[in-house]
Amino acid sequence: RKLTIYCSGMRNMTFEATLRTLPGTLLFNMVAHPSGELFSQSHVHIDRHPIAFVEILNAYRNGFLPVEPPNIAPETWASEVDHFRMLSCTKTLTGIDVMKSRNSVHLGNSANRPPPGWKRRIYDLMDDPRSSMPAYGVSMVLLVLIVASVLLVCLETVKELMDHPTWSEVLRRVDFSIVA
């Protein structure tokens, strides 16, 4: 039976037999279980990342799930792999063993993150602006300070400003307070 899966505006066509190749995954459940959307219908609409979905669908076709596909952010790819339950597959996929061993399905670079606790909270605050609103605020403040510092370095090259004793002193103090 031919199936059509619309994913964020992209039309993907495949066969039911293709989706039945990876038991335990979301698309397998959609065609295999009576409550699945593709069990009785021949089309479905999915609001997910369309390029990532093509890679997911290719895994059903060729048995290979890329660890880091091109043109997809690692955190997006990890989210899509998790959503489609690709790691729950009972059949061995090439590439998926690497993902499980590298633990790359977690957001961010989990190899360098400290274990849960106060060190992790400090790490997330300073390194991951998506982790919380305060972390986003810290990253924005640091960005503004960096831009201001670069602007001051440029202004210090203007001879007329540096010849003026007041402006020279103001630029020096502001630059010092940003660096400090």
Image: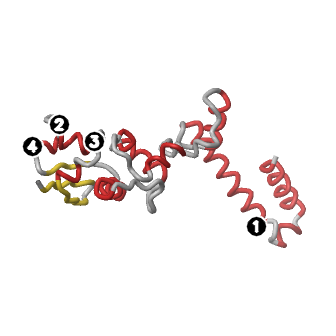
Tell me if label 3 and label 4 are in contact, CB under 8 Å.
no
Which residue is drawn at the image coordinates 72% and 62% (left, top)? 151
Q: Which residue is mark 1?
A: 154
Colour scheme of the picture: secondary structure
Q: Quadrant of residue 37?
A: top left
Of badges 3 and 4, nearer the viewer stands 3
The image shows a total of numbered marks equal to 4
Mark seen at residue 40: 4
- Mark 3 vs mark 1, CA separation in Å: 61 Å
Task: Name the amino acid, label 1.
Answer: Cys
Query: Which SS class for mark 2?
Result: loop
Taking the image as shown, residue 13 lies to the left or right of residue 1, namely: right
Residue 33 circle label: 2
**Cα distance in 3D space between marks 3 and 2:** 11 Å
Q: State the residue in front, 175 or 26.
A: 26
| Mark 4 residue crowding within 10 angstroms, few (<14) / some (14–19) / many (20+) | few
Comparing labels 3 and 1, the label whose residue is closer to the camera: 3
Q: Nearer the viewer, residue 55 or 156?
A: 55
Q: How many neighbours does mark 2 have within 10 angstroms: few (below 14), some (14-19), or many (20 or more)? A: few
Left or right: residue 31 versus residue 69 is: left
Task: Indicate which disc residue 23 carries.
Answer: 3
